[in-house]
Structures are given as C-alpha cells and as structure tokens.
Amino acid sequence: MYSFQPDEEQQMLIDVTRRLAANDLRPAAHEAEEHGEIPVSLVAKGWELGVLQASIPAEFGGFGERSALTSVLALEELAYGDLAGALAMMVPGLFAIPVLTAGTEEQKSTYLPAIAEGAWTPWSAALIEYQFDFDPQDLHTIARPDGGDYLISGEKRLVPFATEAKTMLVYANLDGQTQAFIVDAKADGVTVGEREQLMGINALPLYSIHLDSVRIPKANRLGGEAGHDFGALLSAMRIGISAAAIGVARASFEYARDYAKEREVLGSMIAQKQSIAFMLAEMATEIEATRLMIWEAAWLLDQDNPDAERAAYLAYSGAVDMAMMVTDRGVQILGGHGYIREHPVELWMRNGRGIASLTGLAIV
Amino acid sequence: MISFEKSEAIAQMQYLIQTVADNMMRPYSRHFDEQEGEIPWEYINFMHTAMKQMGAASLVPQPEKEGEVKEKKGQRQAYQLMAYTIEMLSWGDAGMYLCTPRGGLGSAAIEAAGTPEQKAKFLSRLNGDDPIFTAMAITEAQAGSDNSAIQCRAVLDEATQEWVLSGEKIFITAGHKAFVDTKGFIVVWATIDPDAGRAGIRSFVVEAGAPGATITKKEKKLGIRCSDTVTLTLDNCRVPFENILGSPTVEPSTKGFKGAMETFNVTRPLVAASALGVARAALEELKRILAEQGVEIRYGLPRQKMTNIEREVVDMERMVRSSWLLCLKAVWMSDNRMPNSLEAAMSKLHAGEVVTKVTQKAVELLGPMGYSREFLIEKWFRDAKISDIYEGTGQINRLVAARQLLGYSGKELR
C-alpha cells in the first residue's frame, strides 16, 4: 500500500531536526558563511541528535538501522536551517555510510564504533575532481594494482575537513570502475592543498588533496578484494544532495512567501498580485514534486530495488533544476532587497546553484 | 510509514486495463479521431459488461454510507485504483476513456455532495442492463473559470414542488451520451438566488428526457474528438424537488458552494491521472521509435556528457514521474479523508503542464514523423491540451494553490 505519512519515529526525527534548524543553524548561518567558519559547538549539537548514529546498528556502536528515507527527512530539515551547517554535521557519514553498506565485516568493526560511539570527529571522503564534465563513474584519479597493494594517483577537490580528518575514503578509477579506498591521511604521497574558495557553502571547510602514488594495502579497498557496487553509493549520494536541495528551496520559498505578504506595492501586498502568487504556487508545486521523487528513490534504495539507481538519477536531475528555479525566484520576489546579503535569499540562491556541482558532499 | 509499495489490487487492475487499452482502444484510436462524433459502442458495451461482472458500479468508488468506514485507516485505496485505471485508459486513448460508461463527473458530484438517498437512487441505476452515462454542466458562455458568475436559474414551483431550470450550459463532456444516446443524467449547476452570489449556487440532477431540456450543439475540437462536448439548453425544465444536491435554501454562508467546489478535490487529481496516461503514451512511443533508430538513452551521465536527445528524454521521464507522484499523493489523501484542495490543485496544474510539454517535445523530437498522422504522437499532442484546460485551467489551479499557500481568501487574491 502506498503511504505518504512518516511513521512516529520519523516524525520525531523531523521535529528535532526542524527545531535545531530553526533555533541554531539558521541564526548562525550568516556569520558562518561570511567568516568561512562554523562554530564547533553547533556541529557538536547537531551530532548529538544522532541522525547518523541511528543509521548504524548496535553491534557497531550505533542504535538503529540504516534507512535512506529517514535520513532524507532529516537532511531536508537540517539544510532548511543552513546547507553548509547540515553538510558539516553529517560529514562523518561520508565515511560511515559507505563502510556500513559496502564494507567488509572487518572494515565495519574497525571503523564504525569509532565513529558512532564518540563525539563528532571529522571522517571524510574525496570524490569530486575538477573537470567541466566531472563524472563520478569515470574518474581521473587512478588506482592500479601493484604487488599485493594498490597505488593511487590523482587530484581530488572539495574534500571536507581534509586537514583534520585522520582517515578518509578516496574514490578512484580501477580498470574503468569507480572504487573507494580507505586512506590514512598521513600516508606517504598524500598532500592536503589550500582551502577551497567557492561561491557558497563557505562555512564548510573544503580542501584539495593531491595523491602521488599513495600505497593502499589490499585490505583497505572498500568491500575487500571483491570491491563493491559503486552504483548504489552514487545513488545514495545523489539522493542525499537532493534532499538537502529540498531544504534550501523550502527555506527560500517560505522566506519569499512571508516577505510577499508584508511588502506593499501600488496599494496591495505583492503576494496579492497574481504575478507573484503564481510564482509562489509553482515554487511550492515543484518542491513537492521533487520531494516525492526523492522519497521514492530513497525508498527503492532501502528495498535494494534495481530501479533505485535510475530513480535516484532522475530525482537528482529534478532537484538540480528545482533548486535553481526556486532559489532564483526567492531573490526575484524580494527584488533589490533580495540582492543584499542582509537577507538570506541570495545565499540560498548561491547554494541552490551548488546542487549541480556538489554530488559527494552528502550521503544517506 | 512512507511506502511506495504498489498493492496487488492496483497491479492487477493495471494489468487488466492495459489489456483493454491494447485491444479495444489503441487499434481504433485513429478511426474515432477522424470520424468525430461516431460513438465507440464496442468499447462502451465491453466496459459496461466487464464492470458489471466485476461488481463495480462505475469508475467512481462505491459510495460509503454516512459514518461508515469500511476499511481500516490507511487501507482505503478506491481513489488510488481509480487514478491508476484512468491513467491506463488514457494511455490507451484519452478520447475513448471519456466515453467510459457508468460514471463520470456527474456521479462524482453525487458521490461528493449527495445524500445517502440520492446516492442510492442515482448511482445504483448505473448498474442496469444497458450502459448509461452521467455528465456535469457548469460552464456558461459568460461563466467559465468564474463559476460564481453562473446565470442559469433554478426556481422552486411551490405548487408542484418542482425546480424549474432555465438557461444555457456549454462544454458538457459526454452530455450527448448522457442525455440522448443513453438514459443517464446531467448534473446542472444553477443559482437559486442570483443576488446571493456563490451562496445561491446549487447543483441539480437533470435526467435524460426531462421536459424542457435539449442538447442544441455538438462542438468540433482540437483533440479528444471521440468524446462529445455539447450545449444543453434549459427552457423551463422541471425536475423533482429531491434532485437538488445540498440544501434547498440560501444560507448566509457559502457552504453549499464550497461543497460543490469540493468535488474538484476529487476530480482534479483524476484529470491529472488522465493527462499523465497521455504523457506516458507519448514518452513510450518516442523511446520506442528512438530505440528502433538505434538511439540509446544513457542514464546516469552528467548533463555535460549527454546528447540533446538524451537530455530531453530524461527530463520528460522525470517530469512524468514526479507529476504522477503528486497525483498519487492527492488521491491517497482523498482515500484517507484528508483535506487536499492544495494537493489536488498542484497535481492538476503540474500534470496539465507536463503533458502539454511532453507531447509537444515528442512531436518535435521525431521531426516530420512526429507531425504525421501515420503515428499517434500528433494525436496525443492534440489530446493533451485539454488536460491543461478542463477542471480548472492551469491558471485557475495556480490561483487555488496560491490562495491555500498564502492563506488568502478569494477577495484577498483575485
């Protein structure tokens, strides 16, 4: 039977993440973006909600089971508060979720308790590369077998908390297939570059990483010798960033809606004019349509359904356009005021455009 | 618990209806498009018999008695089944779907606003030996989207306790079949007090053969040509007192009008379902022809690596899928008795736009073949457009959605 009703536990999670988004993330967002720094205490507070820990089974130090759909619900709420803050809180998941879903038993018991049991610590992942046609399934960072090990060489970009993370996943091209490798940040040949300067999400510290023939023990290939199915991970990443896109878009929609009800022009509120009201109706409709597609993709992923990959791809494709359309209109509805950084809609527009470029910075 | 698990009942229904679409609709699509006005009796009689055997009164879900809840919460899926059925029938042929007997908008209005007695009286007769049609008459020459501008008049004759209806109704879907070709009925919107505005508007069941009611015009249309669209002229047409849906007196509130408008919360998602059946037909045919010509759609690529055709097809697929989910959520809310006027309007405005765009693109992408009447793509392009118009144009549905989103009344947002 179809149902569009979150269950009780999901609703509780929605409520607590929504509260954190409104009370903590949103008020801190402007300062964090302007100064390129997110308060440590804020990240810790978000971590304590246990969104990721609830995805990890008790035997590995968590207290739940992974559900992409439940994570989607939480991520929308967090990103509604602030995209950079939401991504920062969930950064350990970039390492933990792939290990949980595709790692060997040994990899799981080595890493997951260390992530789930303690306070927030940076565990990172490196997927993105600088090519105009960057394709997660056709990476330029190369892994090649060497003796019993692998040697990885290449340049990774937008790696979160790379200066602090002790261990990270590096995605590389192994015989035409994308595979993840567990890399010690101190390993020979790993160099962390400059802090990245982006159009948005500047509160999230991102770095480039250079890998020069970095030797990876065989046991550190995710999933062991047989490797793993990258398609499922990519789907989880696409769904993750799409869920965040919904949060950003909803923030912009609600702000523009409330502004339009208070802004008087030519004798009536601008929300009372069809030109603005229709824009808002279309924004809300597109947000909802995209949200449902993301939910469905996440649900399919949770069922190990073979349609999940295509559904995730279509949902992501929708989220990219929806986020841009909605956040652009958010600025447009505020007019000149929308262009001023005192209002948040211009930041959401910058973040909205980022959805097209940031696959790999969220996972569910 | 959020779930996208299709129930066995829906899957079976889809399978069944697809057989009908494949065998009884698609092979005749072109014929009935070209022979505008010809009635697809074979399809009509088949559907009538099949539904009768299945124990389904009509496409419209069985009426529930007042206060009776048959299924447990979350278990009712009558409107979901109906949406899937309509989607598949429209995938077969949108014009022929509108020729499905034993129901339609007239029965939907009674299901939404009728008393238990009216439901029993009018809906039970759908189950007779011969197929009958029901229709809804709202639009007038000067009152389209603005329903409250209706001038058709209903006056109570105190002596005979009959309503006397006068006026002219246009754009009645399947009105000819409801009134002339079969012994059905048309639900007519009229005012019992022109000074009362919306508060005075009621709907009346006008049965086939009612004295003073005549079908006076059959329209020629861009698409859905298999379905008749007619004008009903009412000249002192008398109907029994009990044929009024809702209260016979004008009340200070506009509750009666709102009740009538609530029919739209049920019918708008169903128009969306029909639209999306046409959209899926066009998309599948486009993909079939492309595959035949050796064009492969590579899913999963970044846009920068896609060809234009791949990008268009992926966009179309995404639009149809997301629109379908909006529709599904809206009918799921109907099944669960949740207020859904926002979701109903959103699903309708979205699907109307999606089917229009998708069929336009399908014609464009197939070049001269898309324009040819050798294929059905051009027909679907013409059939599609009605979905963005009837049951509230895309613009009216934006207005409805915007009022809900902004918490505005009709006065605050005109």
Image (cartoon, grey):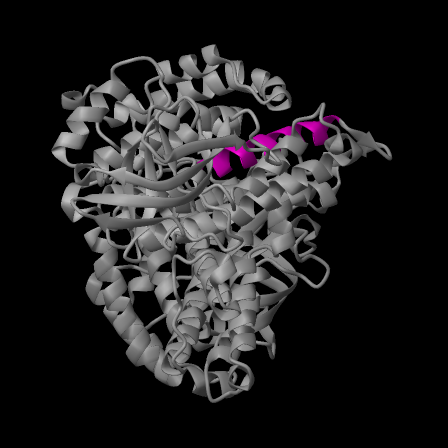
In the rendered structure, the answer to whether residue A233 lies left or right of residue A17 reads left
B4 or A321: nearer the viewer: A321
Residue B213 is situated, as x and y percent measured from the top left of the image, at 57, 68
Quadrant (top left/top right/bottom left/bottom right) for the N terminus of chain B = top left
B201 or A14: nearer the viewer: A14
In the rendered structure, the answer to whether residue B138 lies left or right of residue B299 reads right
Residue A106 visible somewhere in the drawing? yes
**Residue drawn at the location 24% of the way across and 34% of the way down:** A99
B103 or B27: nearer the viewer: B27
Instruction: Please identify the dominant SS of the magenta region.
Output: helix
* A247 in magenta: yes
In the image, is residue A309 above or below residue B173? Answer: above
Locate residue A219: give its quadrant: top left
**Residue drawn at the location 49% of the way across and 74% of the way down:** B380
**Residue drawn at the location 42% of the way across and 21% of the way down:** A17
| Residue found at the very far top of the displayed protein | A41
Quadrant (top left/top right/bottom left/bottom right) for the C terminus of chain B = top right
* B382 in magenta: no
Locate residue A209: give its quadrant: top left
In the image, is residue B357 above or below residue A189? Answer: below
| Residue found at the very far right of the displayed protein | A266
Residue B68 is situated, as x and y percent measured from the top left of the image, at 28, 36
B45 or B155: nearer the viewer: B45
In the rendered structure, the answer to whether residue A101 lies left or right of residue B382 reads left
Count of numbered circles on the image: 0
Residue B308 is situated, as x and y percent measured from the top left of the image, at 53, 68
Residue A63 visible somewhere in the drawing? no
Magenta residues span: A243-262
Residue A87 is situated, as x and y percent measured from the top left of the image, at 45, 28
